[in-house]
Image (cartoon, rainbow, N blue to C red):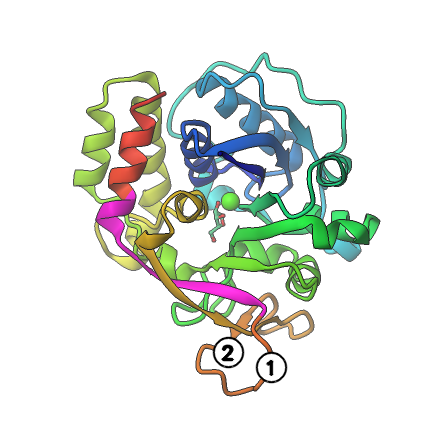
Amino acid sequence: MSQPIIIDTDPGQDDAIALLLAAASPELELLGITAVAGNVPLALTARNARLVMELAGRRDVPVCAGADTPLNGVPLVTAEHVHGDNGLNGVELPEPTLPLDPRHAVDFIVQTLREREAGTVTLCPLGPLTNIALALRQAPDIAPRIKRIVLMGGGFFEGGNITPAAEFNIYVDPQAAHEVFTSGVPITMAPLDVTHEALTTAARIARIRALGSRVGTAVAAWMEFFERYDEEKYGQDGGPLHDPCVIAWLLAPALFTGRDCNVRIETHSELTRGMTVIDWWAVTGLPANAHVLRHVDADGFFALLTERLARL
Ligand code: BDR
Ligand code: CA
């Protein structure tokens, strides 16, 4: 039986590849895609999500637009310096014709969780946690109905990537992250500590390009565009392919190792805003609120991704 999921996303090349991986995987029932402002503003993330679903041949999946700014009037920080001016630079694809679903993303999340059997739907946030926190604020009754939140965000041993202390998704909306991590919903967290092992090396990209399909060509071009910034920053072959780790964990959790930890979010300090304080060594005595992924079998991960992309 396939697992029902909602992907909340801010595409972003790595988000796009996560969407394709999910769209290609029969183990997952893609109930809908909700867009949030993050890598680029909301109008572009909503456009990009539709463009990717069209590329995947999945016009059946509703795409809803959500929050265009973080909670509490915090100004939006974007990442065009990484993803390009439209968020999906690297390849030219036709403008999507798939219409945006008229429902607000937050209403879609609440409605879907109330309609579906409790404890069955997994939320997969790949961007700032604004839509998820708004859904929990608007409808606290949904919290016990969520099977699990599997998110990309944070970093501890690897530090941050937008500031020395903070990873981008959590930095953009730390208040939303705080509300999600204190919601009581089971969480699996894919921080930079694990995604920095999933590197888009030249050999891995070549295998995807060799698929020879429209999807393979687009994904290879996206990886090459997206990695240039991190290759220069970290001085290595390949950049981290962050967001597909979330989908890969759902499909093949044995590729990953991690442990249950207490995780708290810094919301006040100017210096460390958005830091994810992971109690890896259990020194606080605070209860675990997240399963924190630490390592991935990167060859296994790319083999899975490549095999799934070949299906599209
Ligand atoms: C995260 O931020 C975005 O740039 C990526 O899409 C990913 O979700 C990595 O820090
Ligand atoms: Ca993202």
Q: Label 2, secondary structure: give it.
A: loop
Q: Is residue 76 visible?
A: no
Nearer to me, 7 or 287: 287
| Residue 297 forms part of the magenta stretch | yes
Give the residues in magenta. Answer: 289-301
Residue 106's label in the rendered image is none
Of label 2 and label 1, which has the lower sequence position?
2
Disc 1 crowd, CA 10 A, few/some/many (<14, 14-19, 20+): few
Residue 85 in the figure: left or right of residue 111: left
Give me the residue at 28% from left, 49% from top.
199
| Residue at mark 2 to residue at mark 1: CA–CA distance | 8 Å
Residue 299 in the figure: left or right of residue 284: left
Contact (Cβ within 8 Å) of mark 2 with mark 1:
yes
**Amino acid type, mark 2:** Asp
- Residue corresponding to mark 1: 286
- Relative to 174, is 47 above or below? above
> Which x, y percent locates residue 138?
83, 48
**Amino acid type, mark 1:** Leu
Give me the residue at 44% from left, 34% from top.
27
- Residue corresponding to mark 2: 279
> Which x, y percent locates residue 227?
33, 44
> Which x, y percent locates residue 26?
43, 29
Disc 2 crowd, CA 10 A, few/some/many (<14, 14-19, 20+): some
> Which x, y percent locates residue 112?
71, 35
- Relative to 103, is 284 above or below? below
On whether ligand 1 comes within 8 Å of the CB at mark 1, the answer is no
